[in-house]
Image (cartoon, rainbow, N blue to C red):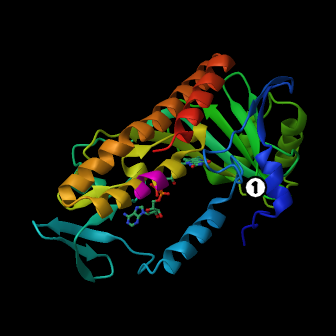
Amino acid sequence: MPTMPDWSRAAVRQMRAASRLYRYADGRVARTVPMIAAAGADDLPPAGGILRPVLADILGRATLHAGATVRLGMSFTSMEQDADGVDVAFTDGSRGRYDLAIGADGVNSKVRAWVKPEFPGPKFSGQGSWRAVVPRLRENSVICMGRTTKAGMNPISATECYLFVLDKRAGMDFIDPADWPAQLAGLLDEFGGELGQLREQIRAGTLPNPRVLYRPLAGHMIAGPWHKGRIVLLGDTVHATTPHLASGAGIAIEGALVLAEELGRRHSLEGALLAYAGRHYDRAQLVVTASGRMGQIEQEGGSLEEHTRVMLHAQEALRAPL
Ligand SMILES: Cc1cc2nc3c(=O)[nH]c(=O)nc-3n(C[C@H](O)[C@H](O)[C@H](O)COP(=O)(O)OP(=O)(O)OC[C@H]3O[C@@H](n4cnc5c(N)ncnc54)[C@H](O)[C@@H]3O)c2cc1C
């Protein structure tokens, strides 16, 4: 079972005061960046880490509570549309006809092949992403900049953090999961302080349940329109970002809100789908390009000044109302 985050008043107050600490690999403090709450959300924490299964559980419950019909563990085999609807054949042999089909099936979307068959696929960013669940050694987030590797920790509960490491790589080569802990520990060799302590625990295999994960990072920003007839794309299918701003899920949810609003207020489906992409494109692009630039700076061992400037500018722009 995933650990539930601590949403007690004390924990929320603590997160409201959150700041992000930048350190050099040897542990020296480079700068502290305050985290500012979103406009109109001063009573909420400006940021908070959460494990994917915990977030998925919250969203899944809300989806059922909203009255949606949910069928899990299946996909579709074909989608055919005419002027009045979309016919979908599912992998369990069932079929359905719908007014609108929304493809929100992620970075390697199968629905996208129906809407944008010419799209060649996501592009490797030059970095690999490593994650592990570790004891919470610090109150707030910390980012440590190595030569071409970035590492840090984000709290996810009263007692746990997730450790993140982004390293420079030549390609998307397969790495055997059995080697992940040793490779992750090797990447932390240049880091001191708490990261050095965690490295030794990963190497010795003494962390209780670290759940080490590796994934090469790939992304894209696909030009609009994001629909063809009655099939529309959402989230990572059209704007898959690297994780540098930790905003990929947020901007995907924002896209869903914009789509719902436009469907609710336009008279024509075509008008609503055009307005959705038109209104959402710039903010999604900001997330993708700012994250991409931060990743480039990390790979080049570039300017920390520029790195924080790009991040703060994007965070400020994303705080603005839609
Ligand atoms: C290493 C890493 C760290 C990240 N960290 C953060 C972060 O801290 N904060 C943040 O906001 N974002 C983060 N992101 C980005 C975030 O994960 C994505 O932007 C977000 O999940 C996109 O949501 P989505 O619904 O579009 O796609 P997904 O979350 O990928 O969901 C797609 C769904 O479609 C399903 N699916 C796929 N193919 C099919 C098919 N053929 N048929 C049926 N179903 C299918 C999948 O099972 C999945 O449930 C990170 C990304 C990476 C790679």
Q: Which of 295 and 59 is in front in this view?
A: 59
Which SS does the magenta portion mostly show?
A: helix
The residue that disc 1 covers is: 156
Q: In this view, does 28 lie above or below 139?
A: above
Q: In this view, does 73 lie above or below 115?
A: below
Residue 309, given in percent of the width and then of the height, sits at 62, 23
**Mark 1 residue element:** loop
Q: Nearer the viewer, residue 166 or 139?
A: 139
Q: Which of 266 and 66 is in front in this view?
A: 266
Q: In the image, is the residue at mark 1 within 8 Å of ligand 1 by its beta carbon? A: no
Left or right of residue 196, residue 173 in this image:
left
Quadrant containing the N terminus is: bottom right
Left or right of residue 292, residue 142 in this image:
right
Q: Which of 317 and 288 is in front in this view?
A: 317
Structural crowding at the residue carrying mark 1, measured as other residues with C-alpha within 10 Å and reported as few (<14), some (14–19) or many (≥20)? many
Amino acid under disc 1: Ile
Q: Give the range drawn in magenta.
A: 253-257
Q: Is residue 134 magenta?
A: no
**Residue 3 in which image quadrant:** bottom right
Left or right of residue 8, residue 284 in this image:
left
Residue 56, given in percent of the width and then of the height, sits at 58, 66
